[in-house]
Amino acid sequence: MRQKLHRYRQFFVILAIMTLVWFVVDMSSMRTYQTTVRVGCVGVDTARYVMTSGDEELPLTVESDGFAALLHHLSWRHRAMDVDLSALEKSATDGRMAVASENYKEELQYRFSPLGRCEIKMQKDSLVFTFSERMQKAYRPLMTDISFVFADGYGLCGMPTLKPDTVFLYGSEESLESIGSLRTQPAEIAVGKEGGQYSLKLVPVWNDYPDVRVSQSEVLLTVPVEPYIEESRTLMVVCEGHNAHERIKLYPDEVTVTFWVPQSRYGADDADDCKAVVRLDDNSGAQELPVTITDFPSELRIKSVEPESVQHVIIK
């Protein structure tokens, strides 16, 4: 009985070895078969273009060994081959773009046989895609609710600028006509002594329109900065809002205003038209009136007002 079991065991071992040898020999032999590779597209500016049609598969004739065919079936069969269409704007003619299949032969040979035992014949000379271009509308982004926090002794030099100064929306004529402007989202920016550039997000109004795309959702804000120097001025206080027939006496009748002035503008007469104003009306029950400084250039900043309020007496 033991001898019979031993013979059976030997038989099955020999059979398994012969089967394995046959399998290796058969899989190592070259074979020719037909297959297809799925095609995907990359590099398309989807904000500007809509693909209306295109080849979704590339048929191939492949000559490779069985191991390479099995590897493709297990690893690559469901993966699309990415076709680069980044040259669409320059290469498309009447919305049609053709890409030579041979450009991807080396990539496909690696897919089917990393060791190089593979021959591939494209059954199409080129892959063809057609696009339609969306309508476009140009917008100049508007800065809204942007506040700056400057380092001590520094301030704005000139005007902040946005780059690019034009942003495009792409979509249907009806949707684009409904969007009147593009604005930046509110932001508070801490600006260093050297100034700098800061990214600002746009309010995404295009999200309300499924067919609209934006060329870019952010813009770059450049903030020029320079040192500021203290400059003081003495201003006569003007009283507004009182009865013209009443005489008003203010104590004191002048205040000292200290400005932060851009270094490049120091000594200029930028603040000649500014005023120190108090308002006296029916609601001004208090004897002291707060002083407000008006009509000074936007690049100047007020550091202090001494005194901040004045007393008043009505002379009858």
Image (cartoon, rainbow, N blue to C red):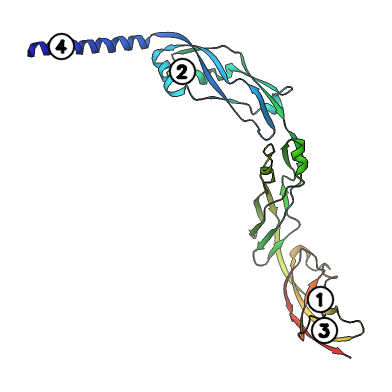
* Residue beneath the point at 66% across and 27% down: 51
Name the amino acid type tagged 3: Asp
Badge 3 or badge 2: first in the primary sequence:
2
Residue 272 as seen in the image, left or right of residue 170: right
Where disc 4 sits, the SS reads helix
Q: How crowded is mark 3: few (under 14 residues within 10 Å), some or many (20 or more)?
A: some
Name the amino acid type tagged 2: Phe
Badge 3 or badge 4: first in the primary sequence:
4
* Residue beneath the point at 77% across and 78% down: 291
Q: Distance between the residues labelled 2 and 4?
A: 41 Å
Q: Residue 276's mark? A: 1
In front: 119, or 267?
A: 119
Where does label 2 land, which residue?
112
Residue 110 as seen in the image, left or right of residue 302: left
Dividing the picture into quadrants, the one containing residue 88 is: top right
Report if the CB atoms under discs 3 and 4 are less than 8 Å apart: no
**Residue 194 appears anywhere in the view:** no
Where does label 4 land, which residue?
8
Task: From the top left corner, tell me how far across and down residue 91 is, in percent.
Answer: 70, 24
Q: Residues within 10 Å of mark 2 (few under 14, many from 20)?
A: many
Q: Is residue 59 above or below residue 287?
A: above
